Image (spheres, rainbow, N blue to C red):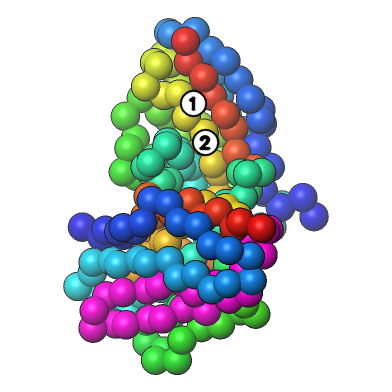
Amino acid sequence: NAGVTQTPKFRVLKTGQSMTLLCAQDMNHEYMYWYRQDPGMGLRLIHYSVGEGTTAKGEVPDGYNVSRLKKQNFLLGLESAAPSQTSVYFCASSYGGRSSYEQYFGPGTRLTVT
Amino acid sequence: AQTVTQSQPEMSVQEAETVTLSCTYDTSESNYYLFWYKQPPSRQMILVIRQEAYKQQNATENRFSVNFQKAAKSFSLKISDSQLGDTAMYFCAFNEGNTPLVFGKGTRLSVIA
């Protein structure tokens, strides 16, 4: 049982390049989330999904797109990377959306945009 | 809008001593959940403790306990017998109903030998 995994762990992009971050969970969770973590800002929600084929915007969705084609995978895309997107990205999943359900986090992806 | 405030950006404590991290939140709901997450230098987010708003009894997990003051919208974390392995960022988080977690900006705790 691997829990939540993220690919890649590190990446350096040039401004304007595109990339996709992959999140995978093997716990059969319905809900999945993408956060970004910046110094002094805590974790901020980018997008989330309440089930296969559904996505919703979070607090800071601009510049990102997501897809949830399979229940176990949640992809985060950057179409044209900008230096402001330099951050650590965390994926999380939970069994359901009720407050009582614990969110399980992946190990994070450190992205640098130059 | 939901907000979570951690007023202490950094704290330090001597090994074996007790430290309390503060957290306040804002909501108009009566039923919600509060969480403390730990993020050590490895960057992994680890759930430390959670509190259900409708429960008056404060949650405890071994050396970790909370002081939940619903009327004051306060949710502090007390770490007893601090250990070097407690050195980490600590995030207070909150959600209500089916909404995603909202995090505070974190408190960096250093345990000194």
- Residue that appears at 35% across and 66% down: B23
The numbered mark 1 sits on a residue in which chain?
Answer: A
Disc sitting over residue A89 in the figure: 2
Disc 1 element: strand
On-image quarter of the C terminus of chain B = bottom right
Mark toward the start of the polypeptide (2 vs 1): 1
Q: Residues within 10 Å of mark 2 (few under 14, many from 20)?
A: many
Name the mark nearer the viewer: 2 or 1: 2
- Say whether residue B82 is magenta: yes
The three-letter amino acid code for the residue at tag 1 is: Gly
The three-letter amino acid code for the residue at tag 2 is: Tyr
Residue A96 at x, y = what percent? 51, 64
**Residue closest to the eye, B21 or A61:** B21
Left or right, A70 with reference to B9 = right
| Residue B98 shows in this picture | no
Residue B49 at x, y = what percent? 54, 72
Mark 2 on the same chain as mark 1: yes
Q: Residues within 10 Å of mark 1 (few under 14, many from 20)?
A: some
* Picture quadrant of residue A70: top right
Disc sitting over residue B41 in the figure: none
Q: Is residue B92 above or below residue A81?
A: below
Disc 2 element: strand
Q: Marks 2/1: CA distance?
A: 12 Å
| Residue B108 shows in this picture | yes
Disc sitting over residue A77 in the figure: 1
Left or right, A83 with reference to A34 = left
The segment highlighted magenta reads B64-86
- Residue that appears at 45% across and 39% down: A37
Residue B10 at x, y = what percent? 43, 51
On-image quarter of the N terminus of chain B = bottom left
**Residue closest to the eye, B109 or B27:** B109
Left or right, B62 with reference to A2 = left
